[in-house]
Each structure stands twice: as C-alpha cells, then as structure tokens.
Image (cartoon, rainbow, N blue to C red):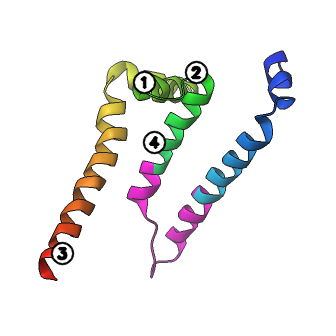
Amino acid sequence: MTQHEKAFKNSVFYNSVTKVKEFMFNDREKTIALADRPQVGAPNFLLALGLCCYTEYWGRLITGIATGKGKECFNTFFDRLGHQYVEVRDNKDEIYRNVRCGLAHSYEDETTRLSQQHHRQL
C-alpha cells in the first residue's frame, strides 16, 4: 500500500467513497445478472451509460475537480483502466464525446421523444 493509499484510508472521505464503490459494483453486478433472465434481459444501454458516468465520477475523485471539465475527468480515469484504454483514446480521442456524451444525449433524446409522444396521446 502506497503512502497516498494509507493517507486516504485514514481520511474522512474513505467510508463514503467505499460505500459509493460498493453501490456501483453491486448495481453493475445486478444489471449483468439480468442477462441470465431472458424474460427480463439486461438493460445494456443503461449499464453502458452508468459505466461512463462512473468513469467520470472516479476521474473527479482522482483530479479533485468537483464541477466542470467532464472530459478531463473521464479521460483521467479511462486511461487508468489499462494500456489498451490509453491506446483506444490515442487512436480515437473522441471517446468522451462519442461514447459518454453520445450515450447520455441519445438516451435523453429518446426519452424526451417518448414523453412528448405520450403527452400528445393524452
């Protein structure tokens, strides 16, 4: 364990971050488990969106950036996932825009369209 890890473990933030991590991992595992239930199926789109949001969240913790600079935060943690992820970003630097933002905004557009369609039918 590094000196930074020891200091973090003794910080006032450790328990909160650990709870968030447990929530994220449990949520992910429950979602993936739905794939084994064909009558329900896994919400793959929401899982992918959640993982992108989690990536940005962990990047915020690493960088200490509370608001703004979402792409920087996302990329910081994305690169820590391994050299394969760095290579993906090196080849296609628009992972944040195309994947994270693309998922978020296409979901938003679809739910907005469905909501408007529903209201017109009322």
Q: Which mark is residue 119?
A: 3
Q: Which mark is residue 63?
A: 2
N-terminal-most mark, 4 or 1 = 4
Q: Residue at x 54, y 28 (%)?
A: 66
Residue contact at pointers 2 and 3, CB within 8 angstroms: no
N-terminal-most mark, 2 or 3 = 2
Foreground mark, 3 or 1, reads: 3
The residues tagged by marks 4 and 1 sit, at their Cα atoms, a distance apart of 15 Å
The quadrant where residue 6 appears: top right
Q: Amino acid at mark 3?
A: His
Please check the rendered image and state whether residue 88 is part of the magenta-colored stretch, yes or no: no
Residue contact at pointers 3 and 4, CB within 8 angstroms: no
Foreground mark, 4 or 2, reads: 2
The residue to which callout 1 is attached is: 69
Report whether 19 appears left or right of 29: right
Which secondary structure, mark 4? Answer: helix
Q: x%, y% of residue 76? A: 52, 23
Q: Nearer the viewer, residue 67 or 72?
A: 67
* Magenta span: chief secondary structure: helix
Which secondary structure, mark 3? Answer: helix
Foreground mark, 3 or 4, reads: 3
Report whether 42 appears left or right of 100: right
The residues tagged by marks 3 and 4 sit, at their Cα atoms, a distance apart of 30 Å
